[in-house]
Amino acid sequence: LTCAAALLLAACDKEKAAPAPVVPVVQVVEAAQRDVPITMEWVGAMDGNINAAIRPQVTGYLIRQNYREGDLVKKGQLLFEIDPRTFEAAVDEAAGIRAQKVARLDTTSANLARIKPLAEKNAVSQKDLDDATGAFQSAKAELEAADANLKTAKLNLGFTKITSPITGIAGIAKAQIGDLLSPSGGELTTVSSVDPIKVYFNISEQEYLKVATAADAAGKKAQDVPLDLILVDGSIYGHKGKVSVLNRQVDVATGTFKVASLFPNPNNLLRPGQFGRIRATMQVVKGAVLVPQRAVQEMQATYSVYVAGEDGRAEFRKVEVGPRIGSLYVIESGLQPGEKVVVEGGQKLQNHTPVSAT
């Protein structure tokens, strides 16, 4: 009897010590409702709106550089000078030859003027008249050739002063003082017009159709969709851009269109070679229901969430998911604004499981 009593007391102690079921603790957030823009993004590479490669047009030694690298230069501003002495001598020589041709033309013109009246009176033969006429025409042609040679010599002399054809940012010089330059020797520098600056990006066929459809629904052209530029530090550039060129065809290698957009750049902040992200706002969804992406579970293209109800239990919900906005999903159906969805601790939940929501 004593042993039986001891066993009975031990069993009662075990029943009293049995732990109560643990209610899982989950973290929840309320489903938000607000107007959200639906956007698309692409990686863009910046380039000058106009890139003028500066090359020498004559052969000679570089004797002077007249600009500071990286500065803004004006159209017509002198950038480089080539030793002009050879070309000055060529101009003088061409001018001397022209003077000879002028003298010869004057002589043949005077000779023809004397022979014409004599030929009318048959005082000289027809051959003499023909010879005088031919000499005059030959001297006239030689003078025209001499004029052309003199003009060419002056042009070559002018090419010794290399100026900028546009207003823009001048790059680092690729030639040093004393280098022998030639037209086939490569460029001296590049001047880029950067206001506005051009940003290239590639857009797929499907994305192009979405952009065109959204623009058409808004009564606009695809080129009229405003663009935002997100810089590498994550900041949004302060000026809106627009599409300027859509390539005529799809690149068969990548299946994308090449697009060029223009952004105002009044302070020359943006430079060729920089990268950024182009963002286009396709539409604005009014009153969209939003939940964090991590609250949504996906299984075989089916999306679901757990909702912490007022009764302290988790409810399994199937939902239809719309576009993703950053780290949020737009929920098109299956969830109401203000309902609490589980974002942490929902991996082991089942429908109607008791939960402690925080």
Image (cartoon, grey):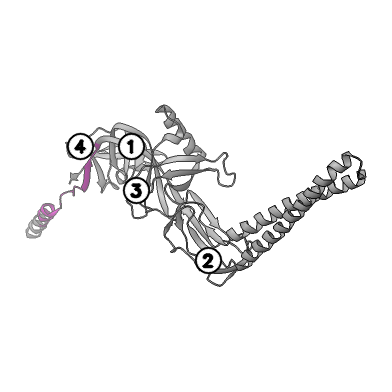
Question: Does residue 284 appear anywhere in the picture?
Answer: yes
Per the image, the residue denoted by label 1 is 37
Residue 52, percent from left and from top: 53, 53
Q: Residue at x 54, y 61 (%)?
A: 161
For marks 1 and 4 on the same chain, the one whose residue lies earlier in the sequence: 1
> Which element carries disc 3, helix, strand or loop?
loop
Q: Residue at x 47, y 38 (%)?
A: 207
- Name the front one of labels 2 and 4: 2
- Callout 4 environment at 10 Å: few (<14), some (14 to 19), or many (20+)? some
For marks 2 and 3 on the same chain, the one whose residue lies earlier in the sequence: 2
- Name the front one of labels 1 and 3: 3
For marks 1 and 3 on the same chain, the one whose residue lies earlier in the sequence: 1
Task: Give the residues in magenta.
Answer: 10-32
Three-letter amino acid code of the residue under disc 4: Gly
Three-letter amino acid code of the residue under disc 2: Lys
Three-letter amino acid code of the residue under disc 3: Tyr
Which residue is more in the foreground, 251 or 273?
Answer: 273
Residue 150, percent from left and from top: 67, 56
**In the shown orientation, is residue 310 left or right of residue 259?**
left
Q: Marks 2 and 3: CB-CB under 8 Å?
A: no
Per the image, the residue denoted by label 2 is 174
- Callout 3 environment at 10 Å: few (<14), some (14 to 19), or many (20+)? some
**Marks 2 and 3, how far apart at CA:** 32 Å
Residue 338, percent from left and from top: 21, 35
Per the image, the residue denoted by label 4 is 309
Residue 295's quadrant in the figure?
A: top left
